[in-house]
Image (spheres, rainbow, N blue to C red):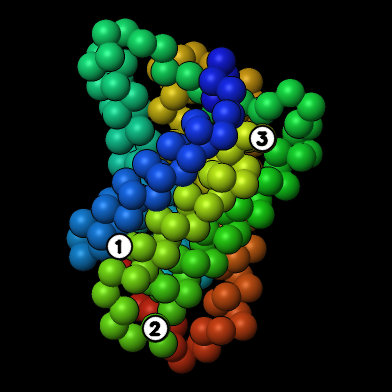
Amino acid sequence: MTYDAPGTPSGLIAASLSHAFALFVAVSVGANISGGHVNPAVTFASFIGGNISFLSAIVYWIGQLLGSVVACLLLQYATGGMETAAFGLSSDVSIGNALVFEIVMTFGLVYTVYATAVDPKKGNIGIIAPLAIGLIVGANILVGGAFTGASMNPAVSFGPAVVSGTWKHHWVYWVGPFLGAAIAALIYDNIFIDDHEQLPVTDY
């Protein structure tokens, strides 16, 4: 959840659908340019799997974090100064609980990314990859949104934290997604992608 914004059923449904549709579009329009990277955890997983270089990962991370901050500033301006709430843990949710939630949800997201967009055996599946990625994020928000906000994306948490100045438990939204992403990448890459099928490392 976000601070001062309780996870009501209607709120979770609205957040789930809006994130699913927005991510579907974002990944679709960026797929042929940058691979549709809008999430530092997904970028980290791609680096762990050897699909992008460390230099490329850094460039992506800078762009993702700057984009998040600019988006939050524009939202604050467009809404007449409305507060942009940071991600936070719900009451009775411990740091350990939150880490498990973020690890598991990000694992599901990155596993979906690998299965539909990274695996060289996937063939030409058109819009299925962006759609599947958007749907898994929407589903995860329905499940975990009331507990941690279901970030799965350090950039999504970073922008609101910068604009609001609220950093409490912020590290959870980096460590959890990065661990979940790394686990998914290592499992999928070592079990389902053979060495000879590894995608070439890209660089700038």
- Give the percent coordinates (x, y) of residue 55: 36, 55
Name the amino acid type tagged 2: Lys
Q: Nearer the viewer, residue 1 or 32?
A: 1
Q: Which residue is mark 3?
A: 147
Gap between marks 1 and 2 measured at Cα: 15 Å
Q: Mark 2 — residue?
A: 122
- Where residue 41 appears, x then y in whole percent? 50, 51
Label 1: few (<14), some (14–19) or many (≥20) C-alpha neighbours in 10 Å: some
Q: Residue at x 66, y 28 (%)?
A: 89
Give the alpha-carbon distance from disc 3 to disc 1, as whole Å. 30 Å
Residue 21 x %, y %: 33, 49
Q: Nearer the viewer, mark 1 or mark 2?
A: 2
Mark 3 vs mark 1: give the one in front.
Answer: 3
Residue at the (76%, 31%) spot, across then down: 93
Q: Which residue is mark 1?
A: 35
Q: Quadrant of the C terminus?
A: bottom left
**Vertical placement of 19 versus 190: above or below?**
above
